[in-house]
Image: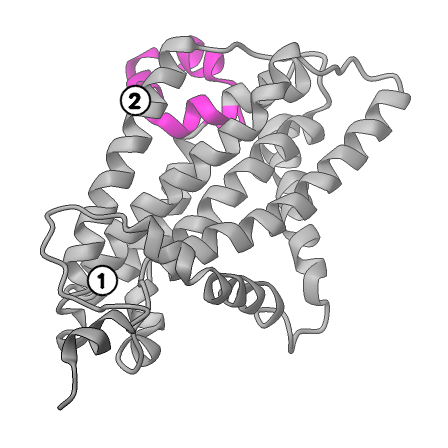
Amino acid sequence: MINTENIEKDWLFEITPKNKFFSLNLKEVWQYRDLLLLFVKRDVVTVYKQTVLGPLWYLIQPLFTSITFTIIFNNVAGIDTGTVPPFLFNLAGITVWNYFTACLNGTSNTFGANAGIFGKVYFPRLIVPISIVISNLIKFGIQFLIFVVFYVFYYFKGATVGLNGSVVFFPLLIVLMGVLGLGLGMFISSLVTKYRDFSNLIGFGVQLLMYLSAVMYPIALINEKLPTYGWLVHYNPLAYVIETTRYMLLNVGQISIWGLGYTFVVTVAVFLVGVLIFNKTEKSFIDTV
């Protein structure tokens, strides 16, 4: 006669329905860390595998965007960046902004893009959006290196640029951007499974959000030129991250402790809501995708 008690003890993993109202289940994610690294490698390597320029697209996009912003907003519109070269001013904001948008766009279609594999094999679904955030961190590192190159170039050219002492906390800003993009992306991905046309609004929404995030202008300019509409920027947590980034890297602008606290609270709230809805959607999304 078979001893079922001993058989049950031999199982390495036990897959059970998720009955908890909220669960990150980081222990299970850690158990599947090899799969997580595999997804990260897939995101980095395969995206530009059959392209002409390959990883050079990581560099071309922020450079051309910074040049365009410099011509339109600084040369034509006359936005003053103080002693900091306009190109370097724009490049600092764009580099950080690109990381957020890459995380948001990459995770906003998690269920739709991975429906095939989700329907065939079990693994913690949270691994996929986390892998996107990590892989985009590698892309951010490449783009940030370009910023460093131009920073050194302008420094030896005689431009008045310098790091602020608070730059040691710069990695925390990047973590905030990644977590905010992850939470918002998981929330949108859950909505897209039921409302397909919602995905069409993402591109437009991100573009509009960029203009409200102080990417190409200092927050002080909004207070001076458009005080009536300044609240649109002041209640945008991304604006404080961009402004603080330039304060740390270029020692220009200002840092708002209240703004950073507000950003932290919003980021945590968006992430928790995103995980909650993501876990709820993964139970039945295969029937609607």
Q: Is residue 261 above or below residue 36?
A: above
- Residue appearing at x 13%, y 91% in the figure: 1
Residue 65 is marked as none
- Residue appearing at x 36%, y 10% in the figure: 258
| Residues rendered magenta in the picture | 214-242
Q: Nearer the viewer, residue 97 or 17?
A: 17
Kindly indicate the quadrant of the structure image that contains residue 122: bottom left
Query: Total of numbered circles in the picture?
Result: 2
- Classify residue 250 as left or right of residue 20: right
Q: Residues within 10 Å of mark 1 (few under 14, many from 20)?
A: many
Kindly indicate the quadrant of the structure image that contains residue 288: bottom left
Residue under pointer 1: 192
- Residue appearing at x 9%, y 56% in the figure: 19
Image spot of residue 268 (x, y percent): 30, 32
- Classify residue 87 as left or right of residue 208: right
Label 2 – label 1 distance at C-alpha:
26 Å
Q: Is residue 7 above or below residue 164?
A: below
| Amino acid at circle 2 | Tyr
Q: Secondary structure at mark 2?
A: loop
Image spot of residue 259 (x, y percent): 38, 15
**Would you say the magenta stretch is mainly helix, strand or loop?**
helix
- Classify residue 122 as left or right of residue 277: right
Q: Nearer the viewer, residue 48 or 282?
A: 282
Image spot of residue 225 (x, y percent): 43, 13
Image spot of residue 224 (x, y percent): 44, 8
Q: Secondary structure at mark 1?
A: helix
Earlier along the polypeptide chain: callout 2 or callout 1? 1
- Residue appearing at x 66%, y 21% in the figure: 249
Q: Is residue 30 visible?
A: yes
Q: Residues within 10 Å of mark 2 (few under 14, many from 20)?
A: some
Residue 235 is marked as 2
| Amino acid at circle 1 | Val
